[in-house]
Image (tube, rainbow, N blue to C red):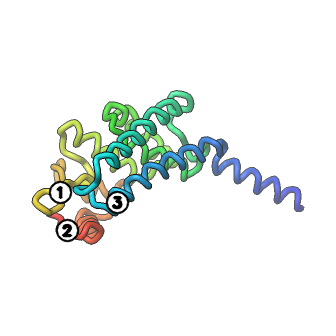
Amino acid sequence: MRLSLLIILFSFQCIAASNLELQKELVSMAKADQEVRNEIVSIGWKNAPSDLLEKMRLIDARNTDRLNEIVKKHSWVTEDLVGKKGVSAAFLIVQHSPDYKFQEEMLPLLKQSFLNGEGVTGQEFALLTDRVLVHQNKPQLYGTQLNILNGELVFDPILDKGSVNKRRAEVGLPSLEEYKKVVAEAYGVPVK
């Protein structure tokens, strides 16, 4: 009885992440990403010293290069390979990548991972989709991208705004109105 329980527990751990070293590396990369951003937030983006902004750019570039190597070897990482933490860490690296072409190349892989239930969430897919569209000077689909304009948060243009809540619901996001409230509260500024 104990042996079979151990086998079941061991099997479950393998399913959770078969490559724990890669998971650990991705999580460490995402931690560096978040630490530098948290430091900038504590100072304020407008007041951040140039050396700290340069540190963030270097981390983002280094993370992008390494994730590109990982994707070339494994394709997009899945929950089976690196666990949920690893997939979320990889997403964060893509989302903060300074290489827009890399983001565009990763979008179909993230979409497939989302559709196949391999670890990418609907929110992550929507965030990257909108980011790629905004960089292409196209309207976003899900209304996740905002900018500060005259002290207010303003959404980048949204395609067919009347249907945005339907698209948001399809990927598990709250309505745009609910999102505005959350963002306004988080940033302490009105959302237009």
Q: Residues within 10 Å of mark 2 (few under 14, many from 20)?
A: few
Q: Nearer the viewer, mark 1 or mark 3?
A: 1
Q: Secondary structure at mark 3?
A: loop
Q: Amino acid at mark 1?
A: Ile
Which residue has dot 1 on it?
A: 148
Q: Quadrant of residue 45?
A: bottom left
Q: Residues within 10 Å of mark 1 (few under 14, many from 20)?
A: few
- Considering the image in quadrants, where does the N terminus appear? bottom right
Which residue has dot 2 on it?
A: 189
Q: Where's residue 22, x and y in %?
A: 60, 41
First reached walking from the N terminus: tag 2 or tag 3: 3
Q: Amino acid at mark 3?
A: Leu
First reached walking from the N terminus: tag 1 or tag 3: 1
Q: Residues within 10 Å of mark 3 (few under 14, many from 20)?
A: some
What residue lies at 26% left-to-right and 66% top-to-bottom?
A: 187
Q: In the displayed structure, does residue 139 sit left or right of residue 7?
A: left
Separation (CA) of disc 2 from disc 3: 21 Å
Q: Nearer the viewer, mark 2 or mark 3?
A: 2
Q: Where's residue 52, x and y in %?
A: 34, 49
Q: Nearer the viewer, residue 153 or 127?
A: 153
Q: In the displayed structure, does residue 11 sit left or right of residue 17?
A: right
Q: Secondary structure at mark 1?
A: strand
Q: Are marks 2 and 1 in contact (CB under 8 Å)?
A: yes
Which residue has dot 3 on it?
A: 173
What residue lies at 32% left-to-right and 64% top-to-bottom?
A: 174
First reached walking from the N terminus: tag 2 or tag 1: 1
Q: Nearer the viewer, residue 26 or 116?
A: 26
Q: Where's residue 116, x and y in %?
A: 49, 44
Q: Amino acid at mark 2?
A: Val
Q: Nearer the viewer, residue 192 or 24?
A: 24
